[in-house]
Amino acid sequence: VSGDYCDVFESKSGLVFLLGDVSGKGIAASMLMSHLHATFRSLADAELPLDRMVGVANRIFAESTMAGQFATLVVGRATHDGAVELVSAGHLPLLHLCADGTKARTATGVPLGMFPSTNFPVFSFSVQAGDSLLIYTDGLTEARNAADEEYGMHRVRAIADGHGTKPPAELISNCLKDLHSFTAGAKQADDLTLLALQRAA
């Protein structure tokens, strides 16, 4: 069971993608993750503006969980012309891989569940043909090797910088290959989820 949340689906207004991490582990975190999944799927059908969608989901999540429970989450919507809207509720930086390098898109708000009423600003940008987006949970950045060293954001960024416009499957494969080389058989301590999206040429 996992507290990580990942979903991609088509809506009337574009491709919706979500990736997040619910606090805690085990069955309790997995149940909260399932709750988030159902909430966003139902809200997506209403075609709400992205900030409104996340705001409503946050209120529902905050009112139905106990104190101290929260979720970091990236919610994005991409249209066929390459326009992307993004809300990052306290999550790790989304990486935008493009021809002129890698750009980090940092959090625009606090994690879901922290406060019932809060604003979630939307960040807008464009992706060109061949550009990729990489989103991941802290199971990647906080993985440790036998010497108790953390994998870290700088290693994720290095993989992204060397990726260019190669296919998303290759990006994820290279990330996992480098991670497994770094941890060298050390026990995995947390859930690990990666999502890579690419705009077709």
Image: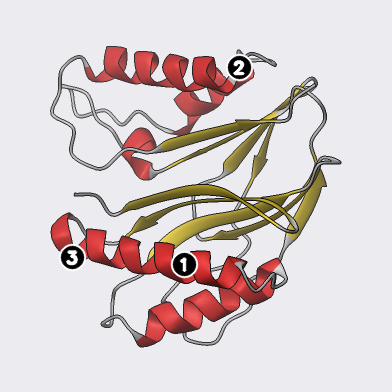
**Amino acid type indicated by mark 1:** Pro
Give the residue pinned by disc 2: 167
For marks 3 and 2, the one nearer the N-term is 3
For the residues labelled 1 and 3, the Cα–Cα distance comes to: 18 Å
Give the residue pinned by disc 1: 111
The image quarter containing residue 33 is bottom left
What is the number of callouts on the image?
A: 3
Give the position of the C terminus as an image quadrant.
top right
Q: Is residue 4 left or right of residue 95?
A: left
The image quarter containing residue 174 is top left
Residue 125 lies, in percent from the top left, at 80, 47
Give the residue pinned by disc 3: 28
At horizontal 28% and vertical 76% (from top left) the residue drawn is 68
**Amino acid type indicated by mark 3:** Ala
Residue 179 lies, in percent from the top left, at 34, 20
Marks 3 & 2, CB-CB < 8 Å contact: no
Q: Is residue 43 left or right of residue 11?
A: left
Compared to 55, does 15 lie above or below?
Answer: above
SS at badge 1: loop
For marks 2 and 1, the one nearer the N-term is 1
